Amino acid sequence: MSHTHAPQALTQALPSYLDPNHLGPWGIYLQQVDRVTPYLGKLARWVDTLKRPKRTLIVDVPIHLDNGTVAHFEGYRVQHNTSRGPGKGGVRFHQDVTLSEVMALAAWMSIKNAAVNVPYGGAKGGIRVDPRQLSLGELERVTRRYTSEIGIIIGPTKDIPAPDVNTNEQVMAWMMDTYSMNEGATATGVVTGKPVDLGGSLGRREATGRGVFTVGCEAARRIGMDIKGARVAVQGFGNVGGVAAKLFAEAGARVVAAQDHGGTIYRAAGLDVPALLDHVARHGTVKGFADAETLPDADFWATPCDILIPAALEGQITEKNAGRIQARMVIEGANGPTTPQADDILHDRGVLVLPDVIANAGGVTVSYFEWVQDFSSFFWTEDEINARLVKIMKDAFAAVWQVSEDNKVSLRTATFIIACQRILHARDLRGLYP
């Protein structure tokens, strides 16, 4: 019997979510890896490592609802790569969570952690649930049951969850407590993004937005854009977009438009950002903010601005709206907000895109600081944390910019070149076991 064609046969049968032609979030990530492969040299022999998650766990999350019935929710934890260190990545509670999305988010975490050179691999988790439909007690029970179910693969040296969409410090406190109870010892380092009183880090809540602002300023300096007076439009006015808007406004920029799940508001002279943040804290949306006009949601993308910050969910900038964007610079606060087709349109139009895998890496950088502080039980001041964060972000961005210039590629491809080389070099050094 001939074995000539065996290797080809082994690589054909990919499930749909591993297929680059099936363009969910995972398909978008696979396209990004394909774009970077020609730049990997000898390490390209390992590139399939990046195209297959190391470990995928799907769990049933049953809980008692307040009305006495039992509800079941589907939960996920994906560890994409752990060649450079333990898995690291958030947990999101959202009614539209899918396996493809969690796999892609885990993979982007691998890239992001390698790009800023923190010693982590990439992981991500999620539960398909609308947390707005749950009472506080039900939310706690969902969190604790999910944590128990994924407890077999997480841990301070294995995989460290963190907050993401619709999860926060309280959810992390419940996760830490549940894991600790099951282990029989307090393990503060099992999650990051915790309350400061439970081993959380100062500066963590603002870290992602601060990173967005830092790389935005670095890029603006390189293209000769003055932040003072620059017009900024922000999609998503929460932990990332709200903080970034505040920092840009404090630096003299005008935040002219804001959009979230509630609607879109605009004011050419600039929105009062502190007042808007207060409004969002009270009402949960930018909708109804008095000192602004309301726009149709689709018109947000055509807002006259210099800097556009998508800081909501993935897949927001597509081939349908990329041609309408007037900004000189797009800073991706969200994970995966721009499709590859839209990326090409923006590139051809001369719009500079600062990709998520570097622009929003501030959160995981300070998560790393939190994890280090938990291990040593020695905590730094907020000024120390912010200074370390800004230095890491500036150094990482400078390296990405240089690779982009040297290879005449986009900043996204440059970030992937750096990150994939680091991940695959670690894979190459470690070899295969057994």
Image (cartoon, rainbow, N blue to C red):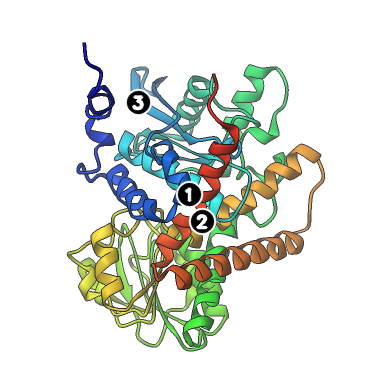
**Quarter of the image holding residue 69?**
top left
Is 429 drawn above or below residue 250 in the view shown?
A: above
Q: Which mark is residue 418?
A: 2
Give whichever of discs 2 and 3 has the lower sequence position: 3
Q: Nearer the viewer, residue 398 or 46?
A: 46
Mark 3 residue type: Phe
Q: Nearer the viewer, residue 421 or 64?
A: 421
Q: How many numbered marks have been drawn onto this rendered protein structure? A: 3
Q: Nearer the viewer, mark 2 or mark 3?
A: 2
* Real-space Cα separation, disc 2 to disc 3, in angstroms: 38 Å
* Real-space Cα separation, disc 1 to disc 2, in angstroms: 6 Å
**Quarter of the image holding residue 129?**
top left
Mark 2 residue type: Ile
**Would residue 257 be found to the left or right of residue 399 on screen?**
left
Q: Inspect this view and state whether residue 340 appears.
A: yes
Give whichever of discs 1 and 3 has the lower sequence position: 3
Cβ–Cβ under 8 Å for marks 1 and 2 = yes
Classify 10 Å Cα crowding around label 2: few (below 14), some (14-19), many (20 and above). Answer: many
* SS of the residue under disc 2: helix
The residue shown at (23%, 66%) is 297
Identify the residue position indicated by label 3 in the image: 73
**Residue 279: x and y, percent?**
45, 66
Identify the residue position indicated by label 1 in the image: 420
Mark 1 residue type: Cys
**Residue 73: x and y, percent?**
35, 26
